[in-house]
Image: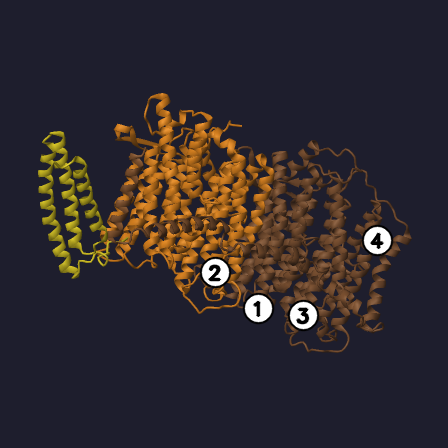
């Protein structure tokens, strides 16, 4: 293995998309027109080259890790931060997903965005996003990771508000940026604390010196807020914000305001899984704090249930998929909390395949249906849009983790791991979540493609959109092979795979199938009546539709008081002090200037009076 | 006589610009550009030998006797920190001239005369090593700015100019008192009358008198920085000032406050400063939050940016009083980065006002649809001001916060929440100005002059964000001579 | 024989009449005349004091006051004439343009 060659190859991976983005951004600033064809070549070309580089890296890398340093970024006193990339099995999987799925989505976007007037701007943002995401997963220190972290946040902001003429989209973009910023600020404080305690920001060094400084004494110590737990919780805050987990999850459904391929790439396949990546990357730190691990698992479990139940009642096809994304990332967090890091990343990978597939086919559907988002205004499309129908079927099956689909293997792994760790409560929630997931995904499928036709599609997806769809469909079925590198990386010596009884395995397999059957009878056959009229149910429906009313709650608790507070102090309370000084001196001026009235006799009278008074005073002393 | 020539070039350039007005109304701005370029020429020996900088304190050190009766000399010197700030002054002076290019149509000669004279004053402030000379330059930079606001400002210019003048004069008076007290105390004890910084640096006052003398300096610089509750002049001055003056104010005038804190307050009175540090840190944290909250509630775009300035300069104070190397470096970086990003925002607002004759967020909106270049540049600087990693402001804020965290963790956490608020008000600018439905008519997009101006500032910010090490090394040269072992 | 007391009383009375005239008269000319009366009151006092103390300094002061009064009247009347030409009035209550 030639070190120089590999380090150049590795550097090329983030720099190629960055180069593409730079060209596409700078050209219009200096009034250079680029034809659409060239824009597509630059954008897709740079990503495909990056994808080829990461394939080469997959072949060439035969060491556990590789850490080239390309230069110094900041060096002040003992604080040294370098431009160093870190490649191991985890980041290799991540860059493969990002460049691979990213390439397919770029390709798809050429078709999808064909008629948009801001074609070039779209690809500039998308390339910039891929570059930032690659920096995020390749960084060897927390600050460089933070650069990528904020970079993807920025691109997400720009792309959610891509159609900026509508204020609604901009508000969704603002919401996404600010809510993730809250988490990021927590993460930044975590970085300060880690540097303060350990004197370094290099991720590998942090984990080794943390293990020395705060050795894990008792595995069963719970609810103990020691230093390592605080660090982990602060990092978790960042992860929660980025990955749309409780309590910062409510931005993700609104983020669907952006173009659909963006939702596929950023808000399903890659960026929102950055939190999972962060925790997996810092697993050495999190393993030192059982309490933090508990928190990760709890966040994941609660989120997966809340989001799945909210997905059950949505009408907008993209919102259903958004809630299901939140819920699936909840599974990953649950797996992380259970210590099943490799299972979490494995689920991240399969989720990237099938969720990208689902979003892209939803995009194709919306594209063909005159930008219709409401699933209840569609129906009977199975015959009319066969390609979309097939893709949806594969995607929903993988999402529902029907046997032998890719999602099946990863979800089974997580469920099995939960049983291994004796986390039965979490296991039950996960099973319930699996049932709901299968139910709502096939609700989506049946409502859109069966029943009576309400609206005719006006076009079929173009060929350039079908190619990525078919590749992703293939991956969603057969992508369920866990990368060996991940297993090696996260395997701990003593964790033998405990075997579970056949009954439990069969049960976990049967649960989603039951849900599908139930959904079939509910939505295809209409056995149970489609809408159950009852005021209590209606209220629950409304409550779930609003995503458990988190937005309302935050509005009342944070936003309204904040706006009220700032509005009250609009003209700066401190200025009053200076205004008072001005007022007092003006009053004094007015008072004294009365004596200067130009009346000669008034002046002489006061002169005489004052002389008399002062003379009297002087003489009488 | 490098520095003296540098200042003389600016002063003479100013007079030349004034005289040239009789030839043509366009002549003064060319004279201004020319003299700002020529002003770089004396610095060539330093700029081309940056690698050869040793730990020796002064890169250039020159002195001639001035008022020998009071032992006052014309003592100018620069080290790494001063050099950075002088370069910032000349660069942003150029940006200011470019920003005023089309906006100023009346009495151009006198305008550029004032602009160049105040720049000369600022350069003098950054170079003076004689306390009396420092005070003289301090006044030289203020009076022209007062005239610039009062003559070429917007609707409420008299009030704003007066407010600016009174606040800074009050600070200047306190500083003058402190200088006199310091010099006299030194005279009483050593029998030697001197205003020389280097001599006075050796002198050690008693705790009591050091505190009061330090306080005088501190308040003068805190007003200039500005720090809540002395910040009220800033929003008014910025709102009413013509674009070029806003640029100068934000880019360099506020920096004289930070420079003064580092050069005088912290260096001459380390113990007294260390004693008040907890209170100052609290004020700084409050400034960060308060400025951000105020920025959010403003409807006038210039006022909003002005309050964001207050918030950003809070980080400078935070960095100065944390007493760690990283925080100090961060404070210096913040001065440079804020100088560029905020003045770019002011230049943008000026460009918008030039086109639409309004700065109100209620009336603006959807500018991307008609002037995409300006909006794209605007988004860039908005993003810079909210502290996006990879740009100068982030490096600065990161260094300040990570440095302060080691000494004042709780206050740092409070100040860090300013990052969230920064995101909120910055996105408000973006959303209400550039995005949304178009409310006003069409306008002409950025011309080549403006693209050049904006892109050069953008390149500087990216450079500072990705490769700040040369700047850090230069500033380190000053900080090496810092009395660090106070704790 | 005129007593010291009556001399002082006369001079003070004269001075008070002058002051009263300055304070109550509106015509600038009368104010000037009242000032002249006040000057003369002081002059009388000087002469009286000089004769009481047998010292000629007071009489010399009287000569000084005499010349002062003459020049004052010359300048003052000139100003009054100018003022009358400009504003067609000598009423000091109307001549109040010097107020701040």
Separation of disc 3 and disc 4 at Cα?
33 Å
Q: Residue B260 placed where, x, y %?
A: 41, 37
Residue underneath mark 1 = A114
Structural distance between the alpha carbons of marks 3 and 1: 20 Å
Which quadrant would residue B24 be assigned to in this image? bottom left
Q: Earlier in the sequence, mark 3 or mark 4?
A: 3
The residues tagged by marks 2 and 4 sit, at their Cα atoms, a distance apart of 52 Å
Q: Is residue A145 left or right of residue C79?
A: right
Mark 3 lies on a secondary structure that is loop
What residue is disc 3 on? A373
- Discs 4 and 1 share one subunit: yes
Q: CA distance from mark 3 to mark 2?
A: 31 Å
Report the residue at 17% width, 35% height from top.
C4
Disc 2: CA contacts within 10 A as few (<14), some (14-19) or many (>=20): many
Chain bearing tag 4 is A
Q: Residues within 10 Å of mark 3 (few under 14, many from 20)?
A: some
Residue positioned 77% across, 33% down in the render: A217
Q: Which chain is brown?
A: A
Relative to residue A190, is residue C27 drawn left or right? left
What is the distance, in whole Å, between disc 4 and disc 1 at their CAs? Answer: 46 Å
Q: Secondary structure at mark 2?
A: helix
Please state the horizontal and vertical placement of residue A379, each as a whole percent of the image.
74, 75
Element marked by disc 4? helix
- CB atoms at circles 3 and 4 under 8 Å apart? no
């Amino acid at each position: 293995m030639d070190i120089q060659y590999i380090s150049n190859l590795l550097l090329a991976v983030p720099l190629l998309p960055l180069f593409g983005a730079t060209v596409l951004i700078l050209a219009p600033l200096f009034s250079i027109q680029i034809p659409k064809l060239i824009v597509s070549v630059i954008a897709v070309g740079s990503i495909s080259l990056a994808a080829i580089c990461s394939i080469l890296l997959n072949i060439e890398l035969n060491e556990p890790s590789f850490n080239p340093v390309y230069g110094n970024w900041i060096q002040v006193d003992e604080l040294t931060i370098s431009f160093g990339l870190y490649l191991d099995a985890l980041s290799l999987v991540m860059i493969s997903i990002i460049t691979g799925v990213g390439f397919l989505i770029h390709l798809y976007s050429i078709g999808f965005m064909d008629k948009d007037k801001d074609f070039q701007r779209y690809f500039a943002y998308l390339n910039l996003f891929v570059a930032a995401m690659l920096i995020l997963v390749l960084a060897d220190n927390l600050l460089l990771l933070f650069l990528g972290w904020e970079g993807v946040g920025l691109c997400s902001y720009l792309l959610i508000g891509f159609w900026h003429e509508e204020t609604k989209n901009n508000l969704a973009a603002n919401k996404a940026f600010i809510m993730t910023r809250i988490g990021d600020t927590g993460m930044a404080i975590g970085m300060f604390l880690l540097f303060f305690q350990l004197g370094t920001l290099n991720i590998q060094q942090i984990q080794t010196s943390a293990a020395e400084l705060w050795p894990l004494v008792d595995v069963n110590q719970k609810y103990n807020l020691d230093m390592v737990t605080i660090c982990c919780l602060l990092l978790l805050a960042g992860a929660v914000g980025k990955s749309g987990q409780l309590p910062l999850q409510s931005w993700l459904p609104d983020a669907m305001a952006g173009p659909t391929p963006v939702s596929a790439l950023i808000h399903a396949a890659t960026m929102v899984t950055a939190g999972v990546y962060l925790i997996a990357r810092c697993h050495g730190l999190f393993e030192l704090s059982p309490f933090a691990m508990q928190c990760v698992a709890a966040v994941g479990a609660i989120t997966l249930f809340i989001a799945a139940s909210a997905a059950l009642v949505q009408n907008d096809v993209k919102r259903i998929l958004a809630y299901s994304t939140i819920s699936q990332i909840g599974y990953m967090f649950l797996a992380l909390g259970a210590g099943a890091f490799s299972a979490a990343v494995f689920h991240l990978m399969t989720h990237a395949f099938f969720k990208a597939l689902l979003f892209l086919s939803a995009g194709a559907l919306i594209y063909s249906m005159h930008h219709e988002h409401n699933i209840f205004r569609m129906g009977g499309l199975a015959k009319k849009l066969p390609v979309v129908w097939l893709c949806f079927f594969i995607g929903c099956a993988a999402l529902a983790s029907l046997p032998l689909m890719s999602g099946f293997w990863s979800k089974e792994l997580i469920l099995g791991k939960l049983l291994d760790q004796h986390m039965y409560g979490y296991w039950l929630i996960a099973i319930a979540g699996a049932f709901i997931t299968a139910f709502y995904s096939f609700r989506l499928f049946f409502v859109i493609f069966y029943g009576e036709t309400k609206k005719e599609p006006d076009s079929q997806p173009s060929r350039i959109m079908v190619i990525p769809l078919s590749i992703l469909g293939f991956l969603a079925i057969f992508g369920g092979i866990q990368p060996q590198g991940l297993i090696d990386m996260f395997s701990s010596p003593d964790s033998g795979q405990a075997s579970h009884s056949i009954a439990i395995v069969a049960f976990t397999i049967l649960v989603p199938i039951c849900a599908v059957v139930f959904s079939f009878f509910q939505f295809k056959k209409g056995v149970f009546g489609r809408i159950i009229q009852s005021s209590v149910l209606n209220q629950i429906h409304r409550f779930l539709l609003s995503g458990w009313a988190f937005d309302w709650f935050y509005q009342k608790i944070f936003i309204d008081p904040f706006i009220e507070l700032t509005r009250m102090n609009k003209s700066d309370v401190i200025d009053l002090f200076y205004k008072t000084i001005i007022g007092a001196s003006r009053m004094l001026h007015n008072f004294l200037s009365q004596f200067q009235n130009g009346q000669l006799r008034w002046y002489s009278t006061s002169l005489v009076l004052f002389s008399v008074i002062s003379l009297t005073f002087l003489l009488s002393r | 006589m490098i520095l003296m020539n540098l200042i003389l070039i600016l002063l003479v350039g100013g007079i030349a610009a004034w005289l040239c007005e009789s030839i043509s109304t366009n002549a003064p701005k060319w004279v201004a550009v020319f003299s700002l370029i020529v002003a770089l020429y004396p610095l060539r020996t330093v700029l081309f030998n940056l690698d050869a900088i040793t730990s020796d304190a002064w890169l250039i050190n020159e002195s001639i006797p001035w008022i020998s009766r009071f032992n006052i000399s014309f003592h100018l010197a620069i080290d790494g920190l001063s050099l950075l700030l002088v370069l910032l002054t000349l660069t942003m002076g150029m940006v200011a001239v470019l920003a005023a290019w089309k906006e100023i149509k009346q009495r151009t000669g006198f305008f550029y005369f004032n602009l160049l004279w105040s720049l000369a004053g600022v350069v003098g402030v950054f170079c003076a090593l004689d306390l009396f000379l420092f005070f003289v330059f301090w006044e030289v930079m203020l009076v022209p700015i007062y005239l610039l606001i009062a003559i070429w400002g917007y609707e409420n210019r008299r009030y704003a100019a007066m407010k600016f003048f009174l606040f800074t004069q009050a600070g200047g008076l306190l500083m003058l008192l402190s200088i006199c007290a310091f010099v006299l105390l030194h005279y009483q004890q050593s029998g030697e009358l001197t205003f020389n910084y280097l001599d006075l640096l050796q002198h050690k006052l008693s705790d009591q008198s050091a505190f009061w003398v330090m306080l005088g300096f501190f308040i003068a610089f805190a007003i200039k920085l500005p720090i809540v509750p002395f910040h009220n002049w800033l929003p008014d001055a910025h709102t009413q000032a013509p674009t070029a003056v806003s640029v100068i104010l934000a880019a360099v005038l506020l920096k004289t406050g930070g420079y003064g804190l580092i050069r005088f307050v912290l260096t001459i009175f380390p113990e007294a400063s260390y004693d008040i540090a907890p209170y100052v840190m609290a004020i700084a944290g409050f400034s960060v939050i308060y400025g951000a909250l105020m920025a959010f509630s403003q409807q006038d775009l210039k006022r909003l940016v002005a309050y964001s300035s207050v918030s950003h300069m809070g980080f400078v104070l935070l960095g100065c009083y944390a007493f760690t190397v990283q925080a100090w470096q961060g404070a210096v970086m913040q001065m440079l980065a804020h100088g560029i990003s905020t003045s770019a925002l002011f230049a943008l607002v000026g460009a918008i006002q030039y086109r639409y004759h309004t700065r109100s967020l209620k009336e603006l909106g959807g500018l991307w649809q008609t002037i995409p270049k300006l909006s794209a540049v605007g988004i860039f600087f908005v993003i810079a001001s909210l502290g996006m990693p990879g740009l100068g402001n982030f490096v600065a804020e990161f260094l300040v916060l990570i440095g302060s965290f080691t000494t004042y963790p709780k206050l740092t956490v409070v100040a860090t929440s300013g990052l969230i608020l920064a995101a909120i008000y910055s996105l408000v600018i973006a959303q209400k100005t550039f995005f949304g439905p178009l409310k006003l008519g069409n306008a002409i997009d950025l011309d080549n002059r403006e693209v050049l101006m904006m892109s050069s500032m953008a390149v500087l910010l990216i450079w500072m964000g990705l490769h700040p090490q040369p700047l850090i090394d230069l500033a380190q040269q000053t900080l090496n001579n810092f009395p660090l072992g106070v704790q | 024989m005129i007593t010291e007391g009556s001399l002082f009383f006369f001079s003070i009375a004269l001075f008070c009449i002058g002051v009263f005239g300055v304070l109550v008269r509106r015509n600038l000319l009368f104010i000037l005349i009242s000032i002249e009366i006040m000057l003369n009151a002081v002059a009388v006092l000087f002469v009286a004091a000089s004769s009481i103390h047998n010292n000629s300094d007071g009489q010399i002061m009287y000569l000084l006051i005499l010349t002062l009064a003459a020049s004052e009247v010359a300048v003052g009347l000139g100003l009054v004439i100018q003022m009358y030409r400009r504003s067609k009035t000598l009423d000091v209550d109307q001549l109040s343009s010097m107020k701040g």
